[in-house]
């Protein structure tokens, strides 16, 4: 039976069956993220800088959505594995409610906090105004991305990942088509890119809701009698908050890195633009790995609920292998063709001079990244998202940011501005060691206790 495939289908086939649609949809999303910046880069380099400086706030907004959805996904899958269908429905209803509250919170941020956020990073008025306009649209109309993500995760939690490929694919295609229309035809610049983005998200949201209503028979949502359940909300956030904090930590790190680059590198705003371009390119490598994780988490959670240890372990091992394949591909691209990658963003000679060595140095850290991301899926599926949060905290705030600050200042003194980028390989190596230690602990205290 299809609803039981996570407990009976051969693991390798199951991972491909569950993850491939997510990987494809994530690749499409990564592509439209890059296309978005490609069109913005055609407007001007300062416009691209504005989008780059707006990224931490936009990333936090999406992180709250995905973190909440991770908690819902894991709890629904675990409840279905334990055959507790009533709880699965309640978890889903509370997840939709939390998504609504989050969208309202970011609406308020878009209206009252966007300009202050931009001014905290730069005093270039054009960049401030462009970035503010971009954030006001993306955050003010964030209900589209919030409901899109939560309803997609409900489809994933019951094994229907193919439908999430449809929703994300349609949203991405709409965004790609509308980008040049709003940016160049209507001459709306950066704000036009934001409008195209939210229209794509709202369209994907509508399709996700329809597919859940028509195709997702395991989950039945009934909001007429809905009342928020504090116990279930606590369980959702017990799993989801560490994921949200991981993204929040990443946003803080990106904010700090932008400040470091603008303050302590000769390129100033151009260095921040390079950093923003790196994040867009990096998404093309990491998004498929996250798609793999999104497919793997419900498999591990379901088999944890069903007490099938061997299937859990095999899933983790294969996920690590596949994740490493993607990360190695990223390393090869960043090391061999950084100039071609940067040309996608209409890079100026100064941007190329700063960006080529930056991408090569950062690209070397990808060799270790796949295993870390794969292990984080096991932490989240088994309700130990706190470990993922700790790894992220250590990597980005306790290692990457201080090391980057030290190397940027030291590099300025000795005339080597490229030194700052070596903070990435140092941080990635540290996170690999910490992730392995946490997984060994998790195996001894949780996984080994499950009888074969």
Image (cartoon, helix red, strand yellow):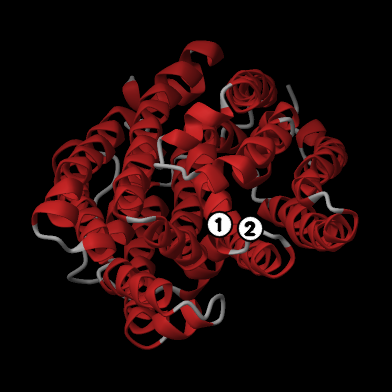
Expressed as whole percent of the image width and height from the top left, the position of residue 160 reads 32, 31
Give the secondary structure at mark 2: loop
Vertical order, 298 against 178 (above or below): above
In percent of the image, x 55 and y 65: which residue is there?
237
Please state which of residues 267 and 330 is positioned toward the viewer in this rendering. 267
* Residue 211, numbered circle: none
Q: Residue furthest bottom?
A: 112
In percent of the image, x 59 and y 20: which residue is there?
329
**How much space separates mark 2 and mark 1, taking CA atoms?**
5 Å
Q: Which residue is mark 1?
A: 270
Give the secondary structure at mark 1: helix
Residue 294 seen in render? no
Expressed as whole percent of the image width and height from the top left, the position of residue 110 reads 35, 79
Q: Quadrant of residue 217?
A: top left
In the visual, does 299 lie left or right of 438?
left
In percent of the image, x 61 and y 55: which residue is there?
271
Vertical order, 3 against 42 (above or below): above
Image quadrant in which the C terminus is located: top right
Q: Are marks 2 and 1 in contact (CB under 8 Å)?
A: yes
Expressed as whole percent of the image width and height from the top left, the position of residue 44 reads 35, 56
Expressed as whole percent of the image width and height from the top left, the position of residue 439 reads 80, 38
- The residue carrying pointer 1 sits among few (fewer than 14), some (14 to 19) or many (20 or more) residues within 10 Å by Cα, namely many
* Residue 267, numbered circle: 2
In the visual, does 127 lie left or right of 411?
left
Residue 178 seen in render? yes
Please state which of residues 182 and 111 is positioned toward the viewer in this rendering. 182
Image quadrant in which the N terminus is located: top left
In percent of the image, x 33 and y 33: which residue is there?
28
């Amino acid at each position: 039976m299809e609803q039981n495939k996570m407990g009976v289908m051969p693991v390798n086939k199951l991972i491909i069956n569950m993850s491939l649609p997510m990987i494809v949809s994530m690749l499409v999303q990564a592509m439209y993220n890059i296309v978005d910046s490609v069109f913005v880069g055609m407007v001007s380099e300062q416009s691209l800088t504005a989008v780059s400086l707006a990224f931490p706030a936009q990333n936090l907004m999406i992180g709250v959505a995905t973190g909440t959805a991770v908690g819902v996904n894991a709890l629904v899958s675990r409840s279905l594995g334990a055959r507790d269908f009533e709880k699965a429905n309640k978890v889903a209803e509370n997840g939709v409610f939390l998504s609504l509250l989050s969208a309202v919170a970011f609406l308020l941020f878009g209206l009252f906090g966007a300009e202050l956020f931009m001014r905290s990073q730069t005093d270039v008025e054009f960049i401030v105004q462009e970035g503010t306009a971009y954030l006001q649209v993306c955050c003010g109309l964030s209900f589209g991305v919030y409901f899109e993500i939560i309803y997609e995760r409900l489809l994933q939690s019951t094994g229907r990942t193919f439908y999430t490929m449809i929703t994300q694919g349609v949203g991405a295609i709409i965004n790609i088509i509308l980008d040049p229309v709003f940016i160049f035809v209507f001459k709306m610049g950066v704000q036009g890119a934001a409008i195209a983005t939210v229209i794509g998200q709202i369209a994907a949201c509508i399709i996700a809701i329809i597919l859940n209503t028509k195709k997702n028979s395991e989950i039945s949502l009934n909001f007429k009698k809905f009342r928020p359940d504090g116990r279930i909300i606590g369980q959702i956030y017990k799993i989801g908050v560490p994921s949200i904090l991981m993204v929040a930590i990443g946003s803080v790190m990106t904010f700090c890195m932008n400040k470091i680059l603008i303050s302590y590198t000769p390129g100033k705003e151009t260095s921040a633009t390079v950093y923003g371009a790196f994040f867009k390119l990096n998404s093309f490598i990491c998004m498929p790995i996250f798609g793999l994780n999104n497919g793997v988490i419900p498999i591990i959670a379901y088999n944890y609920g069903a007490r099938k240890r061997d299937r859990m372990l095999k899933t983790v091992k294969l996920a690590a292998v596949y994740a490493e394949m993607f990360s190695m591909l990223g390393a090869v691209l960043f090391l061999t063709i950084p100039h071609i990658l940067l040309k996608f963003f209409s890079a100026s000679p100064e941007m190329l001079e700063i960006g080529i060595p930056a991408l090569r140095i950062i690209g070397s850290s990808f060799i270790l990244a796949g295993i870390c991301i794969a292990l984080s899926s096991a932490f989240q599926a088994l309700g130990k998202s706190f470990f993922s949060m700790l790894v992220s905290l250590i990597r980005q705030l306790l290692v990457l940011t201080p090391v980057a600050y030290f190397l940027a200042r030291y590099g300025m003194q000795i005339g080597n501005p490229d030194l700052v980028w070596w903070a990435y390989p140092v941080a990635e190596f540290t996170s690999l060691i910490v992730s392995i230690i946490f997984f060994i602990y998790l195996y001894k205290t949780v996984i080994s206790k499950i009888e074969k």
